[in-house]
Image: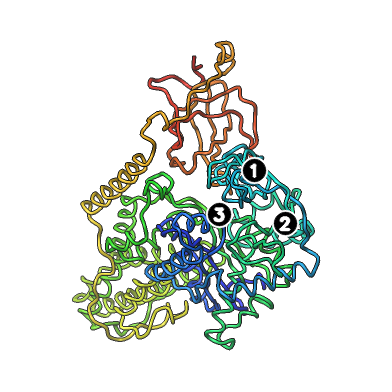
Amino acid sequence: MSHDDYPTDDPAVVTCGLPYANGDLHIGHLRTYVSGDVFARALRKLGQQTAFVSGSDMHGTPVAVNAEKEGVTPEEFALRHHEKYEATFPKFNVEFDNYGHTHDETNTELTTDIVRTLDEKGYVYEKEIKVAWDPIEDDPLPDRYVEGTCPYCGATARGDECDEGCGRHLEPGEIENPTSIRTGNPAEYREREHKFFRVSDLQEYLQEFIDRLEGTDNAKNQPREWIEGELQDWCITRDLDWGIDYPNGEDDLVLYVWVDAPIEYVSSTKQYTERVGSDTYDWEQVWKDEGDIVHVIGRDIIQHHTIFWPAMLHVAEYEEPRAVVASGFVNLNGEAFSTSRNRAVWADEYLDEGFHPDLVRYYLTTTGGIERDVNFSWDRFQERVNGELVGTVGNFAYRSLLFAARNFDGTPDADVSDEVEHRIESAVDDFAAAVNDYSLKRIGEAATALAAFGNEYIQRNEPWKLTDEDPERAAQVIRDCVQIAKALAVVFAPVVPGKADDLWSHLGESGSVHDADIQAALEAPPASFDEPSELFEKIEDERVEDLNEKLQASIEAATSDEDEAEDEDMSDEFEPIADDRIGFEEFEDLDLRVGRIETADPIEGADDLVRLEVDIGVETRQIVAGIKQLHDVDELPGTKIIVVANLEKAELFGTESNGMLLAAGDQADLLTTHGDAEPGTKVQ
């Protein structure tokens, strides 16, 4: 692996975090896979030999839990979802060179081999640990069969991760107040021997690794808290029947899902080589010799990809990742996706509405930087499609090629002007710079900015007036516009592969635009082509209204079904009133103040936390609140809230919190004032 600019002489592999074979895909899930596909296509466009691979994560407790609920085997359950994912991704032009799964023979053998290597090199040891146990059922409880309290921040957490609070990975036995999710019984801890990977012995290596890692800032900065602190060893086995057996079948343990899941990246690459031959692509060169390995993942799994995974690779003598690109989440209408309440735009539903897959690819790629959360709404979707794809890109391509076909039967016989040649070269440079900065947004913007220039150029030169007054100049202008259109097809191909291929065909080009490298942007287009059709179709207001009504109806229906499934006793909807009463004097000890949010910024690497600057009259306080998934962060400034001002200071995800805001219910309905109480006003 080098750290030279792309394209390098080494083969590259781009991977995406493995989807759990555990449910249907919605457009929130698609962000990672679209981003990986865009980056892989962009590398190829620069001339880099690249494989794009992934697979379904078949193992782990969620699969076992849901299979048990359905009364089927975990393998049957997981394979059903794997096959659906395998069919769905191509419908969104996400085209993996190989898409495998973690339960196949290749991954089982490779995982077993790598774990044996870790053991033989002295990096695995046995230790007795406390394992959650259901004392009534007399069964061990693997990580996700347990819920409780995070020992680090106090948030509700599942057995392997504080998913609603600080985001830390949790080892078996760490969670406090454990409860079995299978039976609802309070769990207890019992001693049991498990296998541990000596990650702590690799601290110096990991510190050096994180310094040379490329990718997004969150992927490079979030792990430092652990790598530069007291690095803990990693329990790599679980008490579960479903998974890859620990080598030699010791103690009826299976490997933790995060051992075999990333190894699927290697297995899937190996399967690709077995299919196409090592002369076409050699998996061992990229993984064992010199290769550029790029992982595109969701930010909730940064720790696994920047600590555990490179540590395993290093000991097993595989290449380390060159880059980790971690995306933010996708919210819906400013609120988190909720599968239980059907607050989602499902992948199948999107396609059933007849929208082209490239529209949502463009939206997910270019709406904010990849590290930022994206807010999807049908209204914003319409705005982006109509304004940028229809109004800018489609408008330029159609008017230019239509004028060229009608007046010149194709490309006019003229040279490209210096101005346009330099502008296309600039777009190519912007494209390459965006790839090397791992900026998917700027890859897309290199194309839309070129189209915007094309619209300005044709409007400025008005070739329709020149056809009679100065036909040679008219030919020159349209020759420039056709060249811009060809460059647009080439540069935009990674983001909108289907529509770019359509534009390529409109130009009369043979083959596929995806076979052309970036330098084709400056190659002469065919001499003749027919009148084009329009690339993009405007989305009407009535259509958006209908889509919003359908979405709201599905949310209400799901909410109604959920309510009907609950006990008819309405008192069960809420927590019972506490029996223990407090005196008025104790209540008076609380200093509740009206506050006004001045600024709101997501905390890097934390799924739910937002850093707020809150004016409470006498001063401005920094408060950390877990409301990122439940509120549009950009709209929070100016909001009045109620603050507990005399709460002891706390540190959440490395950020000091000096106070606490008050909110109601699971949706964090912010408590505010009805009138115009000023910041600092005391609540009595």
Q: Which residue is mark 1?
A: 175
Whole-Å distance between the Cαs marked 3 and 1? 22 Å
In percent of width and height, residue 657 lies at 61, 33
Looking at marks 3 and 1 on the same chain, the residue that comes earlier in the sequence is marked by 1
Task: Determine whether 41 is above or below 136 in the image.
Answer: below
Report the amino acid beneath label 3. Arg
In percent of width and height, residue 267 lies at 59, 74
Q: Of tags 3 and 1, which is closer to the observer?
A: 1
Q: Which residue is mark 3?
A: 299
Kindly indicate the quadrant of the structure image that contains residue 155: top right
Q: Is residue 442 visible?
A: no
Task: Determine whether 278 is above or below 682 in the image.
Answer: below
Residue at the image position 53 percent from the left and 57 percent from the top: 298
Front residue (pair 134, 246): 134
Task: Determine whether 477 is above or below 150 in the image.
Answer: below
Residue count near mark 1 (Cα–Cα under 10 Å), binned few <14, some 14–19, many ≥20: many
Report the amino acid beneath label 2. His
Instruction: Look at the numbered disc 1 and give the secondary structure of its residue.
Output: loop
Q: Which residue is mark 2?
A: 194
Residue at the image position 47 percent from the left and 77 percent from the top: 518
Looking at marks 1 and 2 on the same chain, the residue that comes earlier in the sequence is marked by 1
Residue at the image position 67 percent from the left and 72 percent from the top: 2
Pick the quarter of the image with the N terminus.
bottom right
Report the amino acid beneath label 1. Ile
Instruction: Look at the numbered disc 3 and give the secondary structure of its residue.
Output: helix
